[in-house]
Amino acid sequence: MVDWSGGNDRGAKPKKDAIWACVMREGAAEDPVYLRNRQLAEDWLVKLVEVELSAGRKLFLGFDFPFGYPAGFAQALTGSADPLDLWTWLEDRVEDSPHANNRFDLAGEINRSFGGQGPFWANALKRDINGLPRTKAEYGNPFPDRRAVEHLAKGSFTCWQMAGAGAVGSQVMMGLPVLARLRRRFAGQVAVWPFEELGKPVALVEIWPSLNLGQPPAGLIKDAWQVQQVALELAAKPVAELERLLNICAPEEGWILGVEPQ
């Protein structure tokens, strides 16, 4: 399980609001791993997949950011409603390094292509960005504000908010290109839920630790504790229950594992 981050390098000392991962293997959860930036995290993920595939084991990789945007966005931006085409579109345009990236500029560029008031909002940089409003005062969204699953997941944030406490917009924009590269690097061995039929050695699945977990015990970093707890909980589920939770139809927007459809 992986808790992602859309920000810059977080430094050598393990801390909150960074990338954390936990591996559950052969019935035991390993210690959470602190990954200070996305470049190290991507290298770690590649090595993990290589090791597990070489050993003949299957991988169920959970990431805590949306795999798709609200309906209509992918089609309007890329000309295709396939969310995996949107992954590639973002990969081609996102520029990322440990200490800088272009996520806010790209959000502004996308907004300008739709008139300049949305769908993205919240610019955390000191400089203004044409088309990316800092607040929702003059905001206008030509697409739905939320995915269908987010109407059912109390407390979840929208994909459009790029900054602020709890925001996931930056995580999505900086995470999907990494998943696109993983999918291409291990072509034919990766399936993305719920967009593709599972059955390949590696499954990429959207999770949201806050769906079922509360606060961590005193003294523990919440992100680290959560990835370990999610790994333990999913590993403990009966196969039939996991299959039921994975039986979801959401071909454009994606879905959060564990949210019950209505």
Image (cartoon, grey):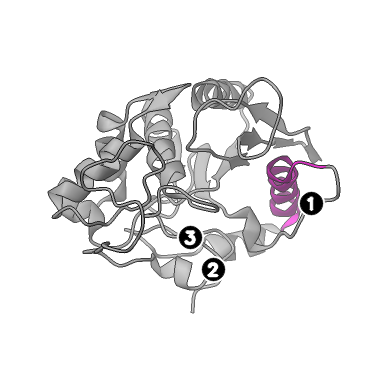
| Quadrant housing residue 76 | bottom left
| Quadrant housing residue 183 | top left
At label 2, the amino acid type is Ala
10 Å crowding of disc 3: few (<14), some (14-19), many (20+): some
Q: Residue furthest right?
A: 218
10 Å crowding of disc 1: few (<14), some (14-19), many (20+): some
Between 38 and 1, the one lying in front of the other is 38
Residue range highlighted in magenta: 220-237
* Label ID, residue 216: 1
Q: Nearer the viewer, mark 2 or mark 3?
A: 3
10 Å crowding of disc 2: few (<14), some (14-19), many (20+): some
* Label ID, residue 153: 2
**Helix or strand or loop: what does disc 2 sit on?**
loop
In this figure, which residue is indicated by the disc labeled 3?
157
Seen in the picture, residue 224 relative to 49 is either above or below; the reply is below
Label 2 and label 3: CA atoms lie apart by 9 Å
Name the chief secondary structure element in magenta.
helix
Q: Nearer the viewer, mark 2 or mark 1?
A: 1
| Quadrant housing residue 128 | top left
Label 2 and label 1: CA atoms lie apart by 20 Å
| Residue 100 on image: x %, y % | 41, 24
